[in-house]
Image (cartoon, helix red, strand yellow):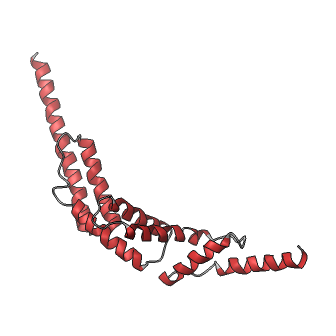
């Protein structure tokens, strides 16, 4: 390639230097998304710190496109928030909107009725569901008090269940002793 090869190497190096940032604001995200889209054609390496930004931003936009009254939207909202957090995506207006929608779902999900033990629900599944609801609510930005209340409910339920099992065991031992 000769002189052209040197020019390509210099252009690639300049492109990679531009991708070094610093990037830390919402206004940088659009640039990073565009630049990463062009990185393949430029044969440029993308720094790991920003490599996941386009996917996370896309997940946020997709989450906002789901119907806000659909229960199936909640997992998508949580996935988008987790992705944005995991790649260090700067806070975008979309982040705020997704959080607000997720908080609405979390508040509904943390209602007393939804956290009651369901008929025929095995105890371990019940506690798992409580803890999952608390974790999801935490990701969604629910208040620490709401999240802790659900975790406390799980702990208290476990204590009650264990006491009942211990009582049952004592009854069985007593029956065996009388036999």
Residue 174 place in picture, x, y as percent:
11, 24
Q: Is residue 11 above or below residue 72?
A: below
In the rendered picture of this protein, how many numbered marks are placed on residues?
0
x 70%, y 79%: residue? 15
**Residue 77 showing in the rendered view:** yes
Measured as percent of width and height from the top left, residue 88 is found at 49, 71
Quarter of the C terminus within the rendering = top left
Position of 109 relative to 28 (above/below): above
One can see residue 142 in this view:
no
- Residue 161 appears left or right of 36: left
Percent x, y of residue 134: 29, 59
Quarter of the image for residue 40 reads bottom right
Could you tell me which quadrant the N terminus lies in? bottom right
Q: Does residue 82 appear left or right of residue 51 in this picture?
A: left
x%, y% of residue 49?
57, 71
Whether residue 7 sits left or right of residue 38 in the image: it is: right
Q: Is residue 6 left or right of residue 93?
A: right
Residue found at the very far right of the displayed protein: 2
Q: Residue at x 52, y 67 (%)?
A: 55
Is 58 or 142 nearer to us in this picture? 58
Residue 178, relative to residue 2: is it above or below?
above
Q: Camera-side residue: 123 or 97?
A: 97
Nearer to us in this view, 159 or 83: 83
Residue drawn at point x = 36 percent, y = 66 percent: 66
Q: Residue furthest left?
A: 178
């Amino acid at each position: 390639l000769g002189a052209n090869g040197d020019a390509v190497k210099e252009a690639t190096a300049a492109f990679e230097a531009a991708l070094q940032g610093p990037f830390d604001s919402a206004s940088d995200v659009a640039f990073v998304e565009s630049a990463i889209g062009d990185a393949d054609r430029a044969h440029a390496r993308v720094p790991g710190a920003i490599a996941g930004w386009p996917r996370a931003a896309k997940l946020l936009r997709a989450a906002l496109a789901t119907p806000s009254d659909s229960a199936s939207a909640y997992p998508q909202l949580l996935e988008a928030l987790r992705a944005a957090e995991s790649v260090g995506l700067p806070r975008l207006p979309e982040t705020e909107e997704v959080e607000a929608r997720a908080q609405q779902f979390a508040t509904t999900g943390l209602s007393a009725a939804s956290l009651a033990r369901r008929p025929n629900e095995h105890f371990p599944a019940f506690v798992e569901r409580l803890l999952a609801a608390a974790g999801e609510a935490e990701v969604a930005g629910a208040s620490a008090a709401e999240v802790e209340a659900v975790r406390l409910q799980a702990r208290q339920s476990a204590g009650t269940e264990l006491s009942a099992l211990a009582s049952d065991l004592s009854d069985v031992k007593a029956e065996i002793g009388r036999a």
